[in-house]
Image (cartoon, rainbow, N blue to C red):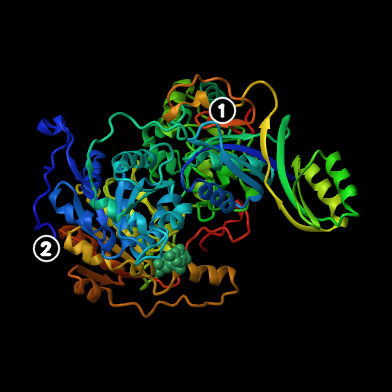
Amino acid sequence: MSQTRLLSVLVENKPGVLNRVASMIRRRGFNIDSLSVGPTEDEAVSRMTIAVHVGRQQAEQATKQLAKLIDVISIDDITGLRSVAHELLLVRMHSPPEKRPEILEVVSIFRGRVVDVAASSLIIEITGSSEKVENFIELMRPYGIKELARSGAVALVRGDRARLSLADLGLNGEGGEESEPAPGLVRIGSVAANTMGDI
Amino acid sequence: MIGAGPRPATSATAPGDGAAAAAPRRITGAQILLESLIREGVDTIFGYPGGANLYVYRHLPSYPQLRHVLVRHEQGAAHAADGYARSRRGSVGVCFATSGPGALNLVTGLGTAFMDSVPVVAITGQVPVGAIGTDSFQESDVIGSTMSVVKHSYLLTRVEDIAPTVKEAFHVARSGRPGPVVIDFPKDLQAEVSEFNYPEGPVRLRSFPPTPEPDPAKLRRIAELIAQAKRPVILAGRGILIAQAEAELLELAHRAHIPVGWTLLGTGAFPLQDPLALQMVGFMGAGYTNKAVCDADVLMMIGMRCDDRVTTRLDSFAPRVEHLIHIDIDPAEIGKNVVPHVSVVADARAALRRLLPMVEPKREHEWLTQIDQWKEEHPVRYVKKPGVLQPQEVLEEMYARCRDEAIVVADVGLNQIWSALWFNYSKPGLFLNSGGLGTMGFAFPASMGVKLANPERTVFCVTGEGGFVMNMQEMATMVENRVDVKVIILNNASLGMVRQFQDDFYDGVRSQVDLTCTPDFVKLGEAFGMKALSTGRSEDVGPMLDEALAHRGPVLLNFDIDPDANVYPIVPLGKGMLDFVEVS
Ligand SMILES: Cc1ncc(C[n+]2csc(CCOP(=O)(O)OP(=O)(O)O)c2C)c(N)n1
């Protein structure tokens, strides 16, 4: 049974890393639903949030193959964990003055914002889960969507503790106390602890 | 003339000696590369020059401790570096190519090394940093083109990165599960001058950990399972050879009396002459190995990927197994094709060394008797025909002259499987082939690397005539460097393995497999300056091999064999492990 799995991946911020990750996922025949990449609190490290559509065993393969890439520092399969996974939607709506109030009402229910106003159109910004974004798009369709841009999800797990603190990593593998990895988290170096189907 | 200019300020002695230690020396990027290679213990480079690596070649003659072998095609360089590394275990093979066409010619060789986990570092010239991306003359995206066939790759962009990158590249290539690494080296950096400081101490990368130690709890569990097993079997893969764990494997097998089979790439890891030896497993494996695997209750796979050539139809693989054990250094191999009950991620030798003291001596008489019976019922054999030379006759004579020490490099096709099935030593030995990618044309250039890495050992290259002509240009390199390889062409005047598949599985329609129009190999060899001999008669085989072995230098031996000789046993496509068809 396949489902969308959400992987939160820390990588070295080096040229070509995105290429390596995307190429590996393609080569192993996994389907990317969305992928977003951006900086973290440490400028040497980027975070990729990858939604892949795979079965459970394939997800394990995807994780292990990713772990083998030299520039990948950690992989966290946060599917099903209590996490915040948000997308950003920008949509240019056809909105003649008579329809505006209705549109703005929906925007306010979705806690969205109007970020640009023109004579007969608006640009609206919505953030939130993929479901929320989808629902909003459905509600907007009848009014006439002129243009739409949507990011992939970025995600963090809820709670006080960082899953993997970058400060702990240290540069070039130095420093950092070895704590038990959170379940689902593959910090490179503790991959061995994470094998499947064992007794 | 290259090398006629002023000598570089450096001597070839290790930097850091004497006066040099006081003030770091300022040398060009090209020299930094070459000195870094020396620091990594490199003594042989297989390469080919061109516009984008000429600064490197400008300085190469100043380093006589680096033997450069000028191949005649870059694919040959990659395979030779591969053969070098496979046969001198622990070392890394090195090849050079220029940008664009030179680098792209390496790709098949890198893919071959990647599939078989061979540590190779390829250094490719690249257009100047500022010209990258402009489609300048002989520019190609080497990093992009090689991405899926290398373990890692580096594009150098600053002269001060050269030494640390070389150090890291060698570390990555040889550590953990080994593999090829590319360093793309722009031309302007080769000429730029900088201080040379080779980084001290081990490389530590937060994203590339040292190989984990085997988990003792899991090893104890494995020892228990061995103790309880009624029908245990071990399958050995190339991981045993890479880890140099042959002695440990023998000890384990002998202590608990476990029969040992192997994959194509694991051939040589366990001696065929040992009473506990099975044979190769799988698609073209021995019937008795497949029977043993299918009846085993505890199956232990060590250092192997368990690909489709091993399992045949997946659901037919080891159906009675109650405890499947998988030991491999690469966590991604665990559960990829078959899901084990117990897995250990570790170097095979480390795992076996720790496991051995936990294993109690034992012997399952009934099981061993059963295995011996299967051995009798399903021998690996061939049928002699009067007046037509069988390939196995040649191989039997060749192996009789190997004295347990020769390294045998096989190409791809029928010749490869025959060579593997007839490999017959009383102790572990080296049998090398492109088992993963199945690259025709591998064996001949690879055997050149093997011989240069092992000058004291006899090296045989066994190949079909199809594969041989794919890289036969390397005859010039062999002759020039007097590389003493005995090349055995098993000439069946066709693309034999494809011909057999067409005969057996594609309605018997022979299509584009006829190679009767191949050259006269004696004349061809002689044209390159190589001693060359040919026969199609059984009685000539032994004397011809003796003559070849008595000759110092490369020899080309053409054997015209039965054009209809096939590989048996074979599991028909889509069938299961026990559906093997034997010679009739
Ligand atoms: C580069 C490459 N091209 C095509 C193939 C497919 N292939 C596998 S075996 C084979 C026939 C090999 O013929 P030959 O070298 O004469 O050896 P034989 O099987 O006759 O021993 C071919 C074409 C391959 N493995 N490698």
**Residue B197: where, in percent of width, then height?**
24, 35
Identify whether B476 is placed above or below B238. Answer: below
Is B198 positioned to the left or the right of A56 in the image?
A: left
- Residue B343 point in image, percent of width and height: 56, 32
Q: Which residue is mark 2?
A: B1
The answer to the question of whether label 1 and label 2 lie on touching residues, with beta carbons closer than 8 A, is no
Q: Is residue B85 above or below residue B253?
A: below
Q: Badge 1: few (under 14), some or many (20 or more) residues near its Cα, within 10 Å?
A: some
Q: Nearer the viewer, residue B292 or B417?
A: B417
Q: Which quadrant is the C terminus of chain A positioned in?
A: top right
- The quadrant of the rendering that contains the N terminus of chain A is top right
Q: Same chain, marks 1 and 2? A: no
**Foreground tag (1 vs 2):** 2
Chain hosting mark 1: A
Residue A193's label in the rendered image is 1
| Residue with the most extreme bottom position | B517
Q: Amino acid at mark 1?
A: Ala
Q: Chain of mark 2?
A: B
**SS type, badge 2:** loop
Closest to the observer, B519 or A66: A66
Q: Amino acid at mark 2?
A: Met
Q: Residue at x 83, y 44 (%)?
A: A107
Which numbered circle lies on residue A175? none
Q: Kindly identify the residue that appears in the image at 16 percent across and 37 percent down.
A: B14
Query: In the rendered picture of this protein, how many numbered marks are placed on residues?
Result: 2
Question: Is residue B459 visible to the viewer in this orientation of the structure?
Answer: no
Q: Where does the image place residue B182, in percent across and percent down from the top left?
A: 37, 50
Q: Nearer the viewer, residue A171 or A30?
A: A171
User: Depth check: A86 or B561 in front?
Assistant: A86
Residue B355 drawn above or below residue B334: above
> Can residue B550 be seen in this snapshot?
yes
Ligand 1: image quarter: bottom left
